[in-house]
Image (tube, grey):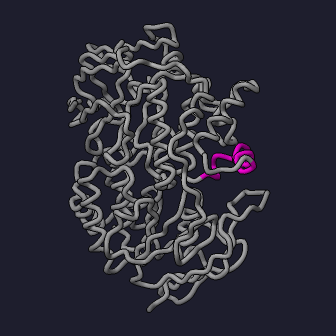
Amino acid sequence: MQHLVDITHVTLFLPGDARQIPVLHDITWSVLRGEHCALLGPNGSGKSTLLRLLRGELWPAQGHIRWHGPQGADESPLTGRAMTALVSPLQQAVYQRRAWDLTGRDLLLTAFDDTPLLYSQANSEQDDAAEAMAYKLQASGLLARQAAELSQGQLRLLLLGRALLRRPALLLLDECDDGLDPKHRRIFFTILEEYASHSTVIMCTHKPGQLPSWCAGRRYMHDGRLWKSGTTTQQATPPGNAGTVRALDNARRVTPADHSPLLELADVTVFINRKKVLDNITWSLHRGEHWRISGANGSGKSTLLRLLAGDEFVADGGRLLRFLTSQGGGTHSLEAVRRGIRLVSDLSQSLYGYDLNVLDMVCTGFDNSIGVYRCFSQHERGQARAALALLFPEYRPEALTRLEGESIRRLSTGQLRRLFLARSLMGDPEILLLDEPCSGLDSEVRTSYLNLVDNLADQSLSIVYVCHDEDDAPLCINREARMEGGRLRVVR
């Protein structure tokens, strides 16, 4: 079979790492045309880094990588970029962080020059191709929307469409369906099967059970090494973490009979850039309730959580009341809201622009600040270390100590997701808002994460949880609602 990429004894360090700690170790792999493959492994094992190497975004410190383009074998990363397309959480975070002024149509059209922004006028054939792709993805309504206004799932869908438009020889997909609602997940994989006849697909996933049957190859990564068969070196996560939670000073326990309100919304409407996103919502959250919010991409779920967290505001005529005991009862100031209510989401993770070490990042949760503005006490640092131990139970003490000093920019998406939950627990909040928190988590970490959420709900926190898949919801959920076109419908 024809070779697409040959990797020979490659060792790789991340750019700017003065310590020269390898992220990939002695990787050898020949990617053959038509051999679709799933790349499996735990969080932080090096999967995303390997995809970036295949794309030509990273360069080996040792060894060689050769792409087999139209002109033959070539070690130039320009050849790699010409024959590949990559969709990843990191790519999506760049678009969210920079909030470029481009429409959904513009985003699709950038595929033809393989540039992040549109620098040239599209011809009629390219414009027709973008229209056709949006139609296939049932995303025609997103073409005129500003990319910065799109939901997580909508942006991911257009980035996937952009990659398919390039019709690359090698298509690299990193957790490609995270954030997609079930309908658009089915649509995308149906279209992907059509393109698999001319594009060789390599996809990273933490849910091998959802892999299409035609993607039959398997490669496994662990600690930056590539294997042809699975390893058993990853330790299972302990079932549950009861007791450890109390180390975080979250000791107040709520009895099931306590149904005093925490949040009350009456006739709430929210506009973003003059577009109505939430429409006349009346809803309340009481102590002892833990809600799951479901709904299609773009229905308003994330906007609702941002509203509750104080990041969006109610239009005239509506009312949002917050009653937080730790903040003195009826709460009106944004500072008090941000101390008592914490939001963990893809967007907040993407927009966190400071390059901090892990321990400082967790400590910023005490003030819910973006960046470090004061010295933290030894007691606060002790609480932060307890949270890290809670969220990374598979790490030995010496590994946790190393993690504390690591830059957050060197962590995987799944590791960052856990880190942001640890940050949200600082300062004893009363309400935890979780927006697709399991995206990017491997199966064992997902189990540990959900067990932790259940323990937090049992002891102190009220949970509002957004997810598409019921399997990704914690067992503590006792109320459900569904967002439909900006309106909230209570299911139970």
Does residue 339 belong to the magenta stretch?
Answer: no
Q: Main secondary structure of the magenta part?
A: helix
Of residue 23 and residue 432, the one placed in the foreground of this image is: 432
Residue 422 visible in rendering: yes
Task: Residue 461: give x, y in percent of width and height.
Answer: 46, 25
Q: Which residue ends up furthest to the right in the rendered image? A: 19
Q: Residue at x 40, y 64 (%)?
A: 208
Does residue 401 belong to the magenta stretch?
Answer: yes
- Looking at the image, residue 87 lies above or below residue 365: below
Indicate left or right for 409 with 463 as reference.
Answer: right
Of residue 182 and residue 287, the one placed in the foreground of this image is: 287
Of residue 321 and residue 382, the one placed in the foreground of this image is: 382
Indicate left or right for 121 with 72 as reference.
Answer: left
Q: Residue at x 58, y 70 (%)?
A: 53
Task: Give the position of the N terminus as an image quadrant.
Answer: bottom left
- Callout count: 0
User: For residue 18, which quarter of the picture?
Assistant: bottom right
What residue span does the magenta drawing correspond to? 398-411
Indicate left or right for 231 with 114 as reference.
Answer: right
Task: Give the position of the C terminus as an image quadrant.
Answer: top left
- Looking at the image, residue 99 lies above or below residue 219: above
